[in-house]
């Protein structure tokens, strides 16, 4: 049997290279994890493996890489659980505020309805008082006056419309006459325009 011995310096260099490569891979894993956290992407072994450019075997076999990924997954799960709890608390607070606002609005509406009912009762009482003061002849006289006033308003509206139409016609005639006078003045100034 022929056994070749490897010089110790080569073995040390190979081990140093392996350690350097492993440390570079761990650094890439940590960079990938921080990028995943920033992007709020779910952390998994497959996602870290793709982002860091290392094999899944490396992530499982290297104790430091395994610990870093496990801590990141646990941290992401804890943050997700906290976010869900915060969201639940926020929804609970929102519903509680809505319920309190609705209850307050209901109290305000009930108070306003009570005030309106009281005011309506007072006004109905005043109306009854006013109706009691009027006699049948007074009501008949006011109704007749109201009818004649309505007729007068209709007549005045018709007259007003007629006068507006006459005014518009007069303005139109005046504009036509102004143009006619301007044309005649232009012809007087420039006698060659007459031919």
Image: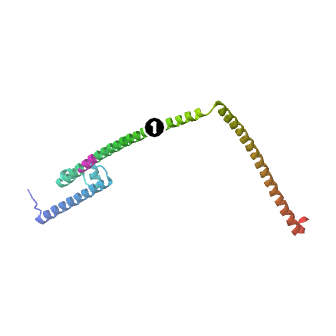
Q: Nearer the viewer, residue 147 or 98?
A: 147
What segment is highlighted magenta in the picture? 75-82
- Between residue 165 and residue 156, name the one nearer to us: 156
Which quadrant would residue 127 be assigned to in this image? top right
**Disc 1 crowd, CA 10 A, few/some/many (<14, 14-19, 20+):** few
Up/down of 18 relative to 45, above or below: below
Q: Is residue 37 visible?
A: yes
Q: Quadrant of the C terminus?
A: bottom right
Compared across the picture, whether 18 is left or right of 91 comes to left
Q: Residue at x 50, y 35 (%)?
A: 121
Q: Say above or below: 116 vs 29.
A: above
Q: Residue at x 85, y 62 (%)?
A: 181
As drawn, the residue found furthest toward the left would be 1
Work out which residue is located at the far top of the displayed protein and give it.
Answer: 136
Q: Is 79 contained in the magenta span? A: yes
Disc 1 target residue:
113
Q: Residue 130 in the image: x percent, y percent?
A: 58, 35
Number of labelled discs?
1
């Amino acid at each position: 049997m022929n056994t070749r011995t490897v010089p110790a310096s080569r073995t040390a260099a190979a081990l140093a290279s392996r350690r350097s490569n492993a440390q570079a891979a761990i650094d890439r894993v940590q960079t990938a994890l921080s990028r995943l956290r920033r992007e709020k992407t779910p952390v998994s072994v497959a996602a870290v493996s793709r982002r860091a450019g290392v094999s899944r075997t490396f992530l499982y076999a290297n104790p430091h890489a395994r610990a870093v990924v496990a801590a990141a997954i646990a941290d992401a799960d804890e943050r997700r659980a906290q976010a869900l709890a915060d969201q639940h608390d926020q929804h609970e607070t929102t519903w509680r505020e809505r319920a309190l606002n609705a209850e307050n609005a209901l109290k305000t509406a009930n108070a306003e309805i009570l005030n309106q009912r009281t005011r309506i009762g007072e006004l109905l009482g005043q109306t009854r008082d006013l109706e009691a003061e009027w006699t049948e002849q007074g009501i008949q006289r006011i109704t007749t006056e109201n009818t004649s006033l309505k007729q007068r308003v209709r007549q005045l509206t018709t007259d007003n419309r007629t006068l507006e139409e006459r005014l518009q016609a007069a303005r139109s005639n005046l504009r036509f006459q102004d143009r006619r006078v301007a044309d005649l003045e232009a012809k007087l100034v420039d006698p060659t325009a007459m031919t």
